[in-house]
Image (cartoon, coloured by chain):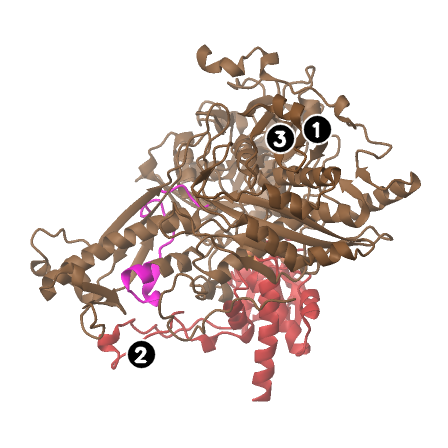
Chain colours: A red, B brown
Amino acid sequence: MVNVTITVNGQPVAADIDERTLLLEFIRDVAGLTGTHNGCLEARCGCCSVELDGAIVKSCNVLAVQAAGRSVTTIEGLSPQRLHPAEHITTGSLAGMYQPLDMLGADAADLHPVQAAFHKCHALQCGFCTPGMVMALKNYLAENPEPTRDDIRAAIAGNLCRCTGYQHIIDAGMEAAEQLRAQADA
Amino acid sequence: MTQTPHRPAEHTTRPRGRLVGQSVPRKEDLALLTGTARFIDDIKLPGMVYAKILRSEVAHARIRSVEVAAARKMPGVLDVLCGADLVGKVKPWGDMMQDLLVGDHTPFAVDKVLYEGQELAAVAAQTKYQALDALEAIELDLEELPAYVDPEEAIKPDAALIQEGITYEFGDGNIFDRYKLRVGDIEAAEAEAAAVVRQRFSTNRQAGAALDPHGCVASFDSFTRELTVYSSTQSIYMVRDVLADVLQIPRNKVRVIVPEVGAGFGSKAQIFPYEVIASIFSMRLGRPVHLVLGRKEIFQSGTARNSQIRYAELMCDRDGHITGYRDYTVHNCGAMSVWGNQVLHIGTNVGMLPYAIPNIRVDGNIVHTNTAPGGALRGFGIPQFIWVKEQLVDMAAAELGLDPLEMRARNVIRPESFPFRTPMGQVIDSTTVYDCLHKSAAAIGWTETKANPVPYEGLGLAVSMKYTSCRHPSFDTDLSAVRLRLETDGTVTIYSSDVTHGQAHATMLAQIVADGLGVGFEKITLARPDSVTSPFGLGTYASRGAAVLGTACRLATERLREKVLAIAAHVLEANADDLDIGDDRVFVKGLPDSGLYLEILASLAAYRTHQLPPGFEPTMEAIATYDTPTEREGPDGTGNLSVTYSAAAHAARVRVDPGTGLIRVVDYAMAHDTGVVINPLVVEGQHQGGFLMGLGMVLGEDYVYDDEGHLTNASFKDYLAPTSTDVPELTKIYELPAPSLTIPGGQKGAGESGTGPVPAAVGNAVFDATGVRFTSLPITPQQMLLALREKDRRGLATFRYPDDMPGFTGPREPQDWPEPLLPDDMGFDWDNFEDEL
Ligand code: FES
Ligand code: FES
């Protein structure tokens, strides 16, 4: 057993762990964040992609002890859960008193532009690959604000998706790049 | 040429107007995008322990002993189970044969191991690591037997029996079921044919390889005797009913709940041993048990596509009209298979489309080998059969000197009136397959390219139709159900047992309810499938969602609407016929800004029942079950098994690098008839995903076995799942809808029609590019290189791979083909079997 502290989405998380513990397991089982998925444990599917000190890694390919003292960003770090209660959904009869929720049940502005683009472009079906895809693209677009479609294809070549045929994911990558550029200009 | 994909309406505003037909952004997305969605591996219950399974590392062996005593003493171990512990205590379950279940599935192998990866023992421990460590302490004494990997070896008369001690009604030896199809007079068709093309084709074993692992969490309460199972299944009632039967406990004491399910593609449409094992551990320990499989285990035991060898013949008249089809099929279901034999029946029946072939004879042997269990997988036998038939069509066109497009145009169904019944028995209620064919050919530039061919570039076409639902030969049902509840605040809850796992049920059903009930889309929620609350339905498979589940939802919506209108008519003292619903309220026609809000009407039924119409049953629930008007398969194999049929015409452009053998699909066009589309962007996504699965099937995915039956590529490292860089831009997607006349809303199935034509379209394009006709799947760069070299060496214009390779040991020419092992040879008179019964 060894004691490690890893900063996960800005919060230090400390625990005594088996030396064999993978960063993926630390995130899921110790930090309790299950948005990072285990699709293979062999560094092939990309479902477990997170940022480690700003670099994209497959967290099943990193031991937790290797990440000790370092900082991890997971999918939950992109759009923290809203902690305030949702407003009551209401009809036109009370519209003056309550703000009806938008159809998502949450404020779209809470989503990272990559997440918002995935929603808009229907870039997810079962959604299991999605957190890894979103993290990979977020990381890539931060360095490469003006990608071509082929660039995006190459950027996600380490992430498998069995559902979408990748087409809408690439659409979403282009859409997100545009939104991020617009944000940067603003 | 690029087409802008459909874009959804802005998601910040409430969608307006009629929602069916709009690309409404999905309700499912938010949890999946932000990481809050809970999949099976994420479920954690108080006191939960972890189980792991010890699987056989050999494919065929007699079990002398499984010694678990040492494992019991390992740290953290709570319980250990093996096959001998359960004999006589749990009921075997099994293959769906004609009208009965054959009990050939058990939680663990008992006397014999039948395939690599089969369950031998399992451990429950405090932690995952402790369970894994304890597995290593289990001692096995296995006597290895020769393994049958090749189904044609397994059916040789001297082959040893794989499944011992099980009597299959229609089988013999390692043939465990047979398929027989008889339409018209095939001998006459052959005698009169102007051209007959004959070729042996074979197909591969492809995995669903859904990224979300198969798994479950089982929790038994020893006082209430209730067993709760969270499972990543596609069908909660299939799991519940089989599990209860296996454990011999009441079905109303078994509760199956699904968390988020990360796709299945058919590979999760059955019960698995791990669900039984976790349940037994939980019953013995009184604690929740987590049992989620690893990737290697899923490859080995999570079911794969059934492979086929077809000795196939296509007959045509002088004008290229197809007059007959005959084949002998050897269908490999692996060591055991719940669905495997159905795949041959349905894939062949529906795979005959979109042609109305008047004379057909198919004899199929459905075979066990010492390989992974065969299961349902996207396309369910149709991609295998289309691979064969659509390449024969190209071969026949070449023989007759016809353009492949013209040959198909002369054959695809184009009746003068609908419904049209084919000789095979399918009732085609509408189709635009002819237009789809021309649309896809035009989009790929068929005519221009044919006039100006480019070396090592080729075009290929393939057409298919896919069932939208299915009445399986062994499963005389095709139903889905929806229960709706108008809540007292005017929101609506939808209950269904058909598991959404990528198909956007929450969105699609809400679109139907919103239109029918005038309730805001944002107020509609789909409850999670749970056998305690969800109405009985079969589950999500066979592309049934939009048409069958959608129809149940539509019927339930209509019933609920009637109740709402009845209350409103009473309160407003109006005639129900004069009322309309919209914008969350009921109003007098023409006065949409007035009226009563749904929340008020619903609360009358709950809290102010004196204001209801006299005699009105105070409930705001409606339930509907829709069973399709499909037929059972007849004794000659014909019948209308699907409620309606969606069409797909695909056109591929491939480029082959003669230096490396690399094959790239550089352009692809898909034209589909999916009937009335509820959500265009979702359907587009289904076609793109369907294409991906077809692309994987033709260019790389396969289970590679060595002679001992070891699966040598049970990992994403070696199993070639297509990545983003393998896929062309998929923008040439066209919908040419012919609304179904049988389904009230006109929908047809979308989920699988994108897969069927892909292998054949690519295969035909590869031939066009290189002159090499691949007759086996998948086509790999290595094979391409070998074929090109051998073809050049021999100076041939055309070449078949592997048939014309020097080392090929199978039968090369039709005169060498095996005689079908006919049931008559086995002492069973098929043609008169009804008299015998
Ligand atoms: S789980 Fe890490 S790459 Fe698949
Ligand atoms: S959306 Fe299912 S794996 Fe990508």
Q: Which mark is residue B781?
A: none
- Residue A3 visible within the image: no
- Can residue A173 be seen here? The reply is yes
Q: Same subunit under labels 3 and 1?
A: yes
Q: Is residue A183 left or right of residue B441?
A: left
- Above or below residue B256? Residue A94 is below
- Measuring from the top left, give residue B137's x and y in whole percent: 63, 36
Q: Element type at marker 2?
A: loop
Left or right: B143 with respect to B283?
right
- Looking at mark 1, is its residue's CB closer than 8 Å to ligand 1? no
Q: Position of residue A82 (x, y in %)?
A: 42, 73
Q: Nearer the viewer, residue B295 or B384?
A: B384
Q: CA distance from mark 2 to mark 1?
A: 66 Å
Give the SS element for disc 1: loop
Q: Provide the chain ID for the residue under circle 2.
A: A
Instruction: Tell me the crowding category of disc 2: few under 14, some 14 to 19, or many 20 or more residues within 10 angstroms, Cα based.
Output: few
- The numbered mark, 3 or 1, whose residue comes first in the sequence reads 1
Could you say which quadrant of the image residue B379 lies in? top right
Residue ID for mark 2: A99
Q: Which of the numbered marks, if any, corresponds to residue B150?
A: 1
Task: Specify whether residue B222 is painted magenta.
Answer: no
The kind of residue tagged 2 is: Gln
